[in-house]
Amino acid sequence: MIELFFVTCLTASPMQCQDRSLLFTQDIGLMTCMVQGQSQLAEWTRSHPRETIHRWGCRSRGNRIAA
């Protein structure tokens, strides 16, 4: 299972950040996650206007090494 992980920060308080993730339920590879992740994050940003995405990446679920 592939995980799209990202860090968001409050727009009004950029030092307040939080780790987040979304799981892809279908069998996809890391490259597909990188391509589809952009649209997933754009959708997430529209529904969370008070937060900005600081960084993001894809990894196998359970792999905690940041990219």
Image (cartoon, rainbow, N blue to C red):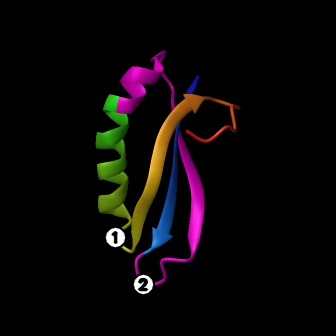
Q: Callout 1: 10 Å neighbours few (<14), some, many (20+)? A: few
Residue at disc 1, secondary structure: loop
Residue at disc 2, secondary structure: loop
Give the residue pinned by disc 2.
12
Q: Quick one: which residue is furthest to the front in this view? A: 67
Give the residue pinned by disc 1.
49
* Image quarter of residue 54: bottom left
User: Could you tell me which quadrant the N terminus lies in?
Assistant: top right
| Identity of the residue drawn at 29% across and 41% down | 39
Q: Amino acid at mark 1?
A: Pro
How many labels, in total? Answer: 2
Report x, y in % for residue 44. Answer: 37, 54
Distance from disc 2 to disc 1, alpha carbons, whole Å, reads 11 Å
| Identity of the residue drawn at 48% across and 83% down | 13
Q: What segment is highlighted magenta in the picture?
A: 11-34
* Image quarter of residue 47: bottom left
| Identity of the residue drawn at 37% across and 37% down | 37
Q: Amino acid at mark 2?
A: Ala
Along the polypeptide, which appears first: circle 2 or circle 1? 2
